[in-house]
Amino acid sequence: MSTFSRILEGTASLFIFAAIVLELFTLLGNTYDKPFLRDLYVIRLTQNSTTDFIDLGLWNSCNGTDGQVLYCDIPQPAFIWTNATGIDKFTSDAFDGYSPVFQANFILYWIGVGFTLLAFVFSVMTWSNNRRFDYTKTAIVTFFGFLIMLAVFCITIVMGARIANTAFLSDTTNASHIGPATWTTLGAMVGLLYATAFYCLSCSFRHRDTRKYDNI
């Protein structure tokens, strides 16, 4: 086994670990009314005429004014943004028929976290096992984790754009911007993509090393 292959595998493991950390930040966002956690929202809608705003996250929403959060809703699984307290100040759209989308996004996120954790376990196990099959298996699991997080990111962006657009149509002074939880989701997705690429390269170099030694 070449040193270069080991470097690639170690780098892939670091990317997977980084993805886990970012995913955990997103899962913990808005779960407790603490300064750091309540800032991990998906999207913020702001009413410029009053400086009031609402942060929409994976578990709940938080309301505030002039940049300061005043209170947060009780966290609940598969939180539907149109059920958020105070959302009617920003948009009157009930988002009828979108409840399954929020539920699917919530479930997919947990599945993505599961695949990422499994990929990290496999990556740790491969350090004590030199069979190339294990690295191929890790690459496959990591790739599936990437696909799931890609789906989550796309759903998040589409729903965020949808509610931001309805808020703007309700009042052209309303503004919106993407929150940290969206960026952490993107970061986790990119981390899994890079990890998959590094594992694929490692498998390729391992295969070359095997053929080289077989010819000796």
Image (tube, helix red, strand yellow):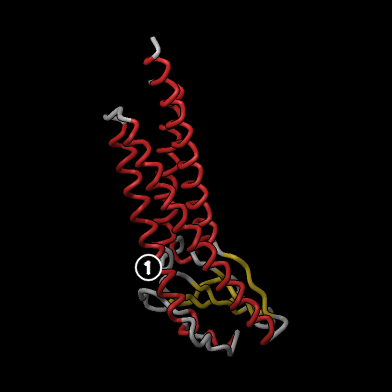
On-image quarter of the C terminus: top left
Is 129 situated above or below 165? above
Q: Compare residues 47 and 138 and report the one nearer the observer.
A: 138
**Circle 1 crowding by C-alpha within 10 Å: few under 14, some 14–19, many from 20:** some
Q: Residue at x 59, y 65 (%)?
A: 178
Image coordinates of residue 81 in percent, x first then y, are 48, 79
| Side (left or right) of 122 relative to 53 | left
Q: Compare residues 31 and 6 and report the one nearer the observer.
A: 6
The residue lying furthest to the front in this view is 215
Callout count: 1
Q: Compare residues 183 and 134 and report the one nearer the observer.
A: 134
Q: Secondary structure at mark 1?
A: helix
Image coordinates of residue 190 in percent, x first then y, are 52, 49
| Side (left or right) of 74 relative to 189 | left
Is 53 situated above or below 20? below
Q: Which residue is mark 1?
A: 107
| Side (left or right) of 47 relative to 19 | right
Residue 169 in which image quadrant: bottom right
Image coordinates of residue 1 in percent, x first then y, are 37, 21
Residue 183 in which image quadrant: bottom right
Image coordinates of residue 29 in percent, x first then y, are 43, 64
Q: Residue type at mark 1?
A: Ile
Residue 10 in which image quadrant: top left
The residue lying furthest to the top in this view is 216
Q: Residue at x 31, y 37 (%)?
A: 124
Q: Residue at x 48, y 63 (%)?
A: 152
Q: Compare residues 15 and 43 and report the one nearer the observer.
A: 15
